[in-house]
Image (tube, helix red, strand yellow):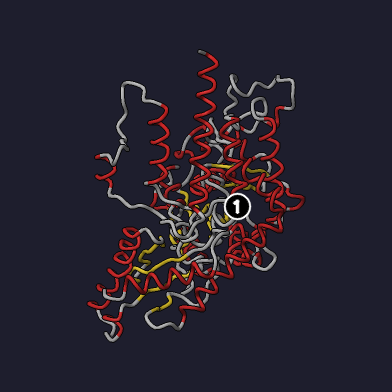
Amino acid sequence: MHREKKKATMQFLLEVVDILTNYVKKTFDRSTKVLDFHHPHQLLEGMEGFNLELSDQPESLEQILVDCRDTLKYGVRTGHPRFFNQLSSGLDIIGLAGEWLTSTANTNMFTYEIAPVFVLMEQLTLKKMREMIGWPAGEGDGLFSPGGAISNMYSVMIARYKYFPEVKTKGMSAAPRLVLFTSEHSHYSIKKAGAALGFGTDNVILLSTDERGRVIPADLEAKILDVKQKGYVPLFVNATAGSTVYGAFDPINEIADICEKYNLWLHVDGAWGGGLLMSRKHRHKLNGVERANSVTWNPHKMMGVPLQCSAILVREKGILAGCNSMCAGYLFQPDKQYDVTYDTGDKAIQCGRHVDIFKFWLMWKAKGTIGFEQHIDKCLDLSQYLYNKINNREGFQMVFDGPQHTNVCFWYIPPSLRGMSDSEERREKLHRVAPKIKAMMMESGTTMVGYQPQGNKVNFFRMVVSNAAVTQSDIDFLVDEIERLGQDL
């Protein structure tokens, strides 16, 4: 009986691998849909043998395999060359293999004791990333965290700890009223950190940007002086390297000058743009990043590493541990037989920490730094191709001149609006165009691209490229599809 069970288990695993390899094949097949869209109520009511409800009795392995297949069938193929919806896309095969191995090893990053190889990989990789930032000899500290929002939160926590260490024990009542500064175009996670860490969103001051979406340094200085005059304490400035919508790069050197003048912590949020440090052609967009006190960099975005893979990198060694350590005796015993400085768990705000390093390390091995550089250059070339294609094309209007990253933002103007002069009515109609086209795209499952309003601008498309499988013909397809679906609006 036991042997039969073993055989059935191995058979089951092989069939799962079969389901996965078929899915991978289809992901790269442009004749397949990006998604098979259903409304939430349809999925909840159950479709052709796919039922989300949980049962008291165990179900057969056959049914479990059907569930595996259906889960993939009704999901979204984020690796499809025509999925442009998020900053993270693509399906890297080496990275996928790394993720499979990680799940099989199923260990936790908190101690060398139970994750010796992974802990060393993380340390070496973070050092290499710090070298690329430009910190002398790659000195400093860092961690992989569950995503850019948490990495950014770490930066706010350690900045507060640096200037007001007593907050760790006494709480926010031990500090004066502290203020954070970030671009009006920055990621909402800075505001969220302000709320979560007890600063309050009222103390997160938004900075004005130029027409390309970059912070205006003079505005930062004026707002710092204003805050000081009120008797509050400016603490932290976040400069964005690759903003979410425009892909804008704030002028880090000019911001760093101001931070030095007023003794503020400088964080660079390179969640989206950090990957450009790998490219000799594009790394100048992050000039000055070596002056930052901390940097967020997400290999799971521009570099195509499978989710999740986000690093918080810190220039000062020891401050992460100072800020977060609790010295739990049942996990971080000081009298182990190996060098306990390799136990990273006490630096983190998590206890359980997923192994995010292996897939990234394995991809770096397989591609080399040069492979990441080629990937990044190619994606930026493709976005330039899109920009050039639609810049003077009838029915398209750009939101800003010349992309700084792979973000290309544009309005599609249907024929019915092309003759209309600018008015409230035209704006309202144009505001409805992108959501309608997007809905039709999703219903037909051909492609996905994001849209949003920004400030006083009505809804526009935000096109991004980070998938190595994308070609010029996919860009052409997207433009044709927008024209086809928007023709009669």
Mark 1 = which residue? 295
Q: What residue type is labelled 1?
A: Val
Label 1, secondary structure: give it.
strand
Q: Measured from the top left, where is residue 31 in percent x and y?
A: 45, 59
| Residue 161 rendering spot, x and y as whole percentages | 56, 41
Q: Residue at x 56, y 59 (%)?
A: 469
Up-down relation of residue 254 to residue 291 (above or below):
below
Q: Residue at x 65, y 48 (%)?
A: 363
Residue most toward the right? Answer: 137
Tell me residue 358's x, y (percent): 63, 40
Is there any visible trace of residue 433 in the rendered image?
Answer: yes
How many tags in the picture? 1
Above or below, comparing residue 178 to residue 167 in the picture:
below
142 with respect to 459 (left or right): right
Residue 458 is drawn in which quadrant? bottom left
Circle 1 crowding by C-alpha within 10 Å: few under 14, some 14–19, many from 20? many
Report the residue that reaches farthest toward the left. 425
